[in-house]
Image (tube, rainbow, N blue to C red):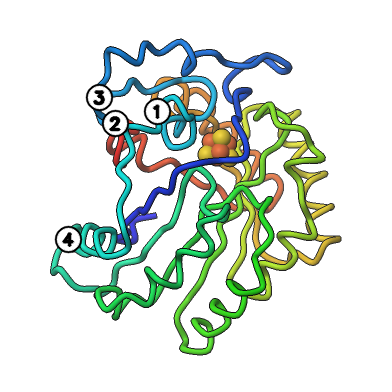
Amino acid sequence: MGVPSVFLRTFGCNFKCAGFGMPRGELSEEATKIDLDLYKDYNSLPLVSTGCDSYASWDPRFRHLSPVLDTDAIADAVVDTLPHKEWRDEHLVITGGEPLLGWQKQYPDLLDHPKMRGLKEITFETNGTQKLSEEFKEYLQGWYNMSREITFSVSAKLPCSGEAWSDAICPAVVGEYVDYGTTYLKFVISTEEDLKDAERAVEEFRAGGFTGPVYIMPVGGVERVYTLNNRAVAEMAMRKGWRYSDRLQVLLFKNEWGT
Ligand code: SF4
């Protein structure tokens, strides 16, 4: 938090996470009920208080609102957001949707682009279900050897997301990330039941070779939901000796699109 960062959001996800913010077992229909005819661009889409708060980055109904850019155009757009139009202390966060889907084959082209020279640190914000391809592993190893930093921020999905445990908790996949970058787990929590699920998941991830720290974060893409349980989740983290992750973008920007 607080690190100057550029977020590159890829389109598509293997999950829907319609359970967030809903009573257990129920799925949100908030995003599916949005009337597409009312919205002509991404930034005007409504924020949702239940389900995935990044719905427009994977739901095919909103696909036409995402630009399709080639590598040059992405590199230009990314560097254009930097305050000095060149990399200094900024960090590139590649997020989604799920950024480790088929996009893995495109990253070497982008990260080797002349405009990306000077970039020293990247983070993949992943749900931890996608294996790294052999080609991508080789590429990441090269990055590592050049003392550039790679982080896997693994937001594994607990049952409160609405996704099935067997699909969402993939210890062998995450156990492999550890060999290619700093890896931590991050769980979205609202209740004690979620905390118990997180404990079970951490045990499974540890058995699969995960060695890093664990963060928990309050549910809530909008402020009124988020502020309901942030203190309780912080206290759970203190009790467990885990790390607490705030949602700074909700407090600062009210989770507007682009933040
Ligand atoms: S994994 Fe992330 S982007 Fe995909 S549906 Fe779930 S919360 Fe949304």
User: For the residue labelled by badge 3, is the local secondary structure a helix, a strand or a loop?
Assistant: helix
Residues at marks 3 and 1, CA–CA distance in whole angstroms: 12 Å
Disc 2 target residue: 42
Q: Nearer the viewer, mark 3 or mark 1?
A: 1
In the image, residue 190 lies at what x, y percent?
Answer: 62, 28
Which badge, 4 or 3, comes first in the chain's sequence? 3
Do the CB atoms of the residues marked 1 and 2 lie less than 8 Å apart? yes
On-image quarter of the N terminus:
bottom left
Checking the image for residue 36, the label placed there is none
Residue visible at 65% across and 67% down in the picture: 133
Q: Which mark is residue 44?
A: 3
* Contact flag, marks 1 and 4 (Cβ < 8 Å): no
- Give above or below for 36 relative to 178: above
In the displayed structure image, the side of residue 11 where residue 116 appears, left or right: left
Q: Which residue is mark 4?
A: 80
Cα–Cα span, label 1 and label 4? 25 Å
Residue that mark 1 sits on: 62
- Asked if one can make out residue 234 in the rendered structure from this viewpoint, the answer is no
